[in-house]
Amino acid sequence: MAALQARRVRPVTLRVACAQLAARPWEDAPVTLRDIRSALRAAHDAGARLVVFPEASYPGYVVPERGPVRTTPSVREAVAAIAQHARRYRMTVVIGVVQNRSRALYNVALVIEPDGSVAGSYAKTCLWSQDHRWFRAGRSPRIIPTSCGPIGIMICADGRYPEIARSLAAGGARLICDPTAWVGWGPSYDRIPNLQADCMLRVRAAENGIWIAAADKCGSEREAVVYAGKSQIVSPEGRLAAVAPPDRAAVITADVTLAPARPCVVALSEEQRNALSGTHKPRAHSGRGSRYPPVFRLGVYQGMRTRGRAAFAALHAQGADAILATGDSPAQIRRILGRLRGLRWRVLQGGDMLAPEPARAAALAGADLILWLRPPRTASALDIARTRAAENRVYVILGLHPSRVAAACVIGPDGMIASSTLLGAPSGCLSCIDTRLSREKTIAFATRAFVPESLQGICWLDRRRGVFRV
């Protein structure tokens, strides 16, 4: 992917909108097109110059197993109608559609300019679970030049891979648009968790210093695929500038300054660069037949070891194989973990986890557990730790001292908190570290934690050596 010359494009401030649509099946394509037209009108009335629609806005996300795959109006006719409205309202439109190309379906995002022309398209590269049944994957992230400036495009599950957004920011994108279909399960629409919506997108924006606009659907499609809603526009600092409700259609807006991205960059070791550049393949192994047990009970004490004697005794009484104190030095932690033969781990300190490269390199080198020592005492530290755990399928220990902002905790490979200490108080917790989970790098059915080898145009950043390609 050729880097764009960002310095040739002046910063532009414009109002960006995300149109959250009600989910509908393919059979309701005429109603879906009506919804899209209404959202375009609402975005125009709100003063938006660029509007982002969800993944597979037309004709729908779930591809029926049986019955017609053709719709009325056809995708071509629907795109022509949308382009006409883009021209009428003088807006740039980013919209997800399902396209039939060479007898295969692709999950595509189209970028339509204010004059009605198609500036470019992007086919989703990292397919999610059932996507493999329906769509053929694209081959490369895309930055599309527009009248607003260069726009990076990713679609839904692409956002789970730090390489995708990293490459778009490094390539010169001024804004990342994310047509998405965040799905989940829960007892009600307003209680559906989704890691991307709940924390990961904010981390993507902050680690790359770039605005991200993500549009989702709401409701359910065919009464079986349930959407999380929560369309959002996130600032380069990782703050929500606008967010939609989880359970109803809406158009949200925010004023965005499209300036060059300012990624968070850290210095990498030669070992980390080798892991990221593919010098060696990800270490994959099973706990079966292992000489050592793959499961460990690990205690974490929030505070100084010298002050936690009662807590240490209680954790040992519960069967802890080892106990770490957040006040321990890296040398102490290495000695303690060195006794757990069969556990693979890495220690990262301070701002190293703010950039995605060190944790990614640790996972590629085979780490089961990452200990984040002396993290910044901010509420975003927990979001970052959860994101690093989920995107790499590893355990992460957030090694905070007692604080009112966040608590020391153990996060599982799914990004969920496995155990936590008390907020602002010296306290301990116990977690099971099951290395079988951290060594199985499957995020969802047929979806792995690392990008496909066929993916082109991927890069990483190193403070010492700048951009390097994979």
Image (spheres, helix red, strand yellow):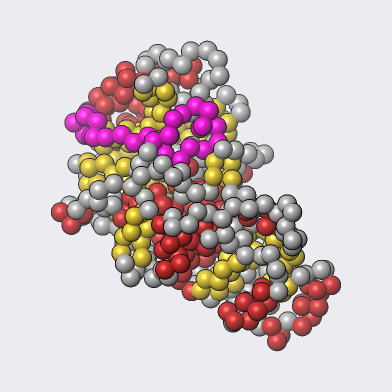
Whole-percent x, y for residue 309 in the image? 77, 83
Residue 120 sits in quarter: top left
User: Is residue 198 in view?
Assistant: no
Image: 260 above or below 233: below
Q: Say which residue appears at 70% left-offset and 61% top-offset.
A: 433
Q: Is residue 62 above or below residue 338?
A: above
Q: Is residue 128 magenta?
A: yes
In the depicted view, which residue is nearer to us: 288 or 331? 288
Query: Which residue sits furthest right?
Result: 317
The residue closer to the viewer here, 254 or 127, is 127
Magenta region: which residues?
Answer: 113-138
Left/right of residue 138 with respect to residue 423 in the rendered view: left
Residue drawn at the location 58% of the way across and 45% of the way down:
443
Residue 217 spot, x, y in % from top left: 48, 35
Pick the residue in front: 452 or 63: 452
Q: Residue at x 62, y 69 (%)?
A: 408
Horizontal side, residue 396 vs residue 148: left or right:
right
Whether residue 169 is visible, yes or no, is yes
Residue at the extreme bottom of the image, as rendered: 306
The question of residue 149 being in magenta is answered with no
Asked if residue 278 is positioned above or below residue 452 in the image, the reply reads: below
Give the main secondary structure of the magenta stretch.
Answer: loop
Left or right of 445? Residue 89 is left
Identity of the residue drawn at 48% across and 37% down: 127
Viewer-side residue, 119 vs 47: 119
Residue 359 position in % (x across, y down)? 50, 62
Q: Quadrant of residue 308?
A: bottom right
Residue 379 position within the rendered picture, expressed as x and y whole percent measured from the top left: 52, 65
Q: How many numbered dots are placed on residues in this image?
A: 0
